Structures are given as structure tokens and as C-alpha cells.
Image: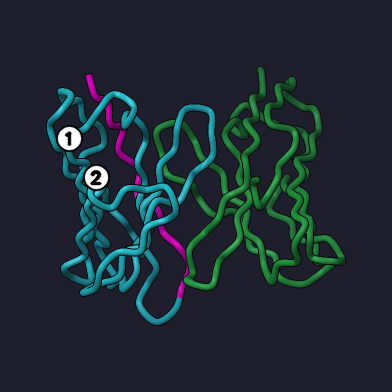
């Protein structure tokens, strides 16, 4: 059983559309990170959310941490082909290792 | 700053041979490095945690005798896939944490194909 479940698993949309990716867990976590990974590359950190209810914005990306700190969402406004990639949520364990969510593969078509 | 170099970026080897992958922190010291494996269209799965000067900690289901990890210095960890088989073909990624504090920095990955 995946500790972090992401949905949807795959998403293909047209340029200019909006989308939301979800990351859910049955456990409470102290903080959560979002990464984006392009083919053949390692993941790149987008944001870390720490406080329940927290909202962070990174240009057209909006990240939200659920009030109960068991879920998070990533919303992209006016998606562009450059947003294509694998989006991963992750949480840090006691030994500082990262556990990744199941991932959402986003394809933005021009 | 905080650059992690992974080498090679891709490798093809014959079944039964061994392959070594290097992970170097170029501009910082990393007491802890992590090794992940990623199959196509899947997420990253942690294989092992590598601490400088001590034995690696392997995740459940990862064979320590098959995936040898050495972390002999604060800037280098190596993963050796021994007696590789086609099912070991995957994308292997390392990450490092800066000594003392700091976030994770990932290498660019190694695509291993065993034929």
C-alpha cells in the first residue's frame, strides 16, 4: 500500500487549461514536498508545505496543505507545454529519507 | 550551489556482469545519500540509505548482496549492481543531504539497460 496516493495517475490536457493534482495519506505528516521530474532527469523541488491550511504560490502553481495535514493539492493555472512532467509529492521519514507518492504524469498539448 | 553529479548517465551491460554507478556531491559534504530506483511510468522507490563511513541501510525487499553501496567519503557514494539481469534494467537516482542541514539534491539519474 502506497503511503502517499496521488490522483489522477495520468492527465492529458490542452494548453491554457487549468488542472489540480491531489496527494492523500491516511496519516498526518509534519511537512510535505512537491517535485517535478522530466524524462531522464532527477526530481526538482518545487515547494515545501509545513503548516496546516498553508497556501503557497509559485507563478502559475498554487500548493495547498490540508488543514488536517493529511492531504495536499497542486493547482496549475493556464497550463503550458513546458509544465509537462511527472509531479510527485513526498514526505520525509525519521532517517530523513524521502517517500514519494505514486506520481501524476501530466502532458500539456500545444 | 548544492550540485550532485551522477555518472554514468546511461549504461548498457550484458547479463551477468556488474555495473558501478557513482554519485558525487560537487560543492558540499553529504553525510547521507540515498539511492532510488524508478521503473517506467512509476514513481521513485527508495532502495537504501547510505551513511558515510558505515554500512548502508536497505529497504525491505532490496538485496544488499546484489546492490552493493559504498560511501567512503563525504562526497562520494557508489552503487554496484552485481550479476545484473534484464529485470534490473531501470532508472537509478541518487540524492544527497548537505551536512548539518539543508534539503535534498538529486542527481540526474542513470539509465541501466541489461541485455
Q: Which residues are magenta?
A: B102-115
Place of residue B73 in the rendered image (x, y in percent of width and height, measured from the top left)? 17, 70
At 67% across and 68% down in the image, what residue appears?
A: A31
Q: Earlier in the sequence, mark 2 or mark 1?
A: 2
The residue to which callout 1 is attached is B83
Say which colour chain B has.
Answer: cyan
The residue to which callout 2 is attached is B66
Query: How many residues crowd around disc 2 within 10 Å: few (fewer than 14), some, or many (20 or more)?
Result: some
Which chain does tag 2 point to?
B
SS at circle 1: loop
Labels 2 and 1 within one chain: yes
Say which colour chain A has.
Answer: green
Place of residue B45 in the rendered image (x, y in percent of width and height, measured from the top left)? 48, 46
| Residue A38 vertical placement versus A2 (above, below) | above
At 35% across and 64% down in the image, what residue appears?
A: B57
Question: Based on the displayed image, in which of its 4 quarters is residue B29 positioned?
Answer: bottom left
Foreground pick, A12 / B52: B52
Outermost left residue: B17
Q: Is residue B64 left or right of residue A17?
A: left
Q: What colour scheme does the image use?
A: by chain
Is B2 included in the stretch rendered in magenta?
Answer: no
SS at circle 2: loop
Place of residue A52 in the rendered image (x, y in percent of width and height, measured from the top left)? 81, 69
At 78% across and 49% down in the image, what residue appears?
A: A73
Which chain does tag 1 point to?
B
Q: Is residue B34 left or right of residue A81?
A: left
Is B110 included in the stretch rendered in magenta?
Answer: yes
Q: Are marks 2 and 1 in contact (CB under 8 Å)?
A: yes
| Residue B18 vertical placement versus A95 (above, below) | above
Query: How many residues crowd around disc 1 within 10 Å: few (fewer than 14), some, or many (20 or more)?
Result: some
At 74% across and 54% down in the image, what residue appears?
A: A25
Amino acid at each position: 500500500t502506497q503511503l502517499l496516493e496521488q490522483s489522477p495517475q495520468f492527465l492529458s490536457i490542452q494548453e491554457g487549461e487549468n488542472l489540480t493534482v491531489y496527494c492523500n495519506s491516511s496519516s498526518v505528516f509534519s511537512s510535505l514536498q512537491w517535485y517535478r521530474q522530466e524524462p531522464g532527469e532527477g526530481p526538482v523541488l518545487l515547494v515545501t508545505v509545513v503548516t496546516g491550511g498553508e497556501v503557497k504560490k509559485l507563478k502559475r502553481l498554487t500548493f495547498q496543505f490540508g488543514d488536517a495535514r493529511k492531504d495536499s493539492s497542486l493547482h496549475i493555472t493556464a497550463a503550458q507545454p513546458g509544465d509537462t512532467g511527472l509531479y510527485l509529492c513526498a514526505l520525509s521519514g525519521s532517517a530523513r529519507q524521502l517517500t514519494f507518492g505514486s506520481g501524476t504524469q501530466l502532458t500539456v498539448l500545444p | 550551489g548544492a550540485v550532485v553529479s551522477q555518472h554514468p548517465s546511461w549504461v548498457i551491460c550484458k547479463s551477468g556482469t556488474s555495473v558501478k554507478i557513482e554519485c558525487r556531491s560537487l560543492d558540499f559534504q553529504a553525510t547521507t545519500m540515498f539511492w532510488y530506483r524508478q521503473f517506467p511510468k512509476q514513481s521513485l522507490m527508495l532502495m537504501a540509505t547510505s551513511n558515510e563511513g558505515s554500512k548502508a541501510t536497505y529497504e525491505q525487499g532490496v538485496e544488499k548482496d546484489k546492490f552493493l553501496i559504498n560511501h567512503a567519503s563525504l562526497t562520494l557514494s557508489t552503487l554496484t549492481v552485481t550479476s545484473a539481469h534484464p529485470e534490473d534494467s531501470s532508472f537509478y537516482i541518487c540524492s544527497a543531504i548537505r551536512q548539518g542541514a539543508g534539503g535534498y539534491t538529486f542527481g540526474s539519474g542513470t539509465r541501466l539497460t541489461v541485455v
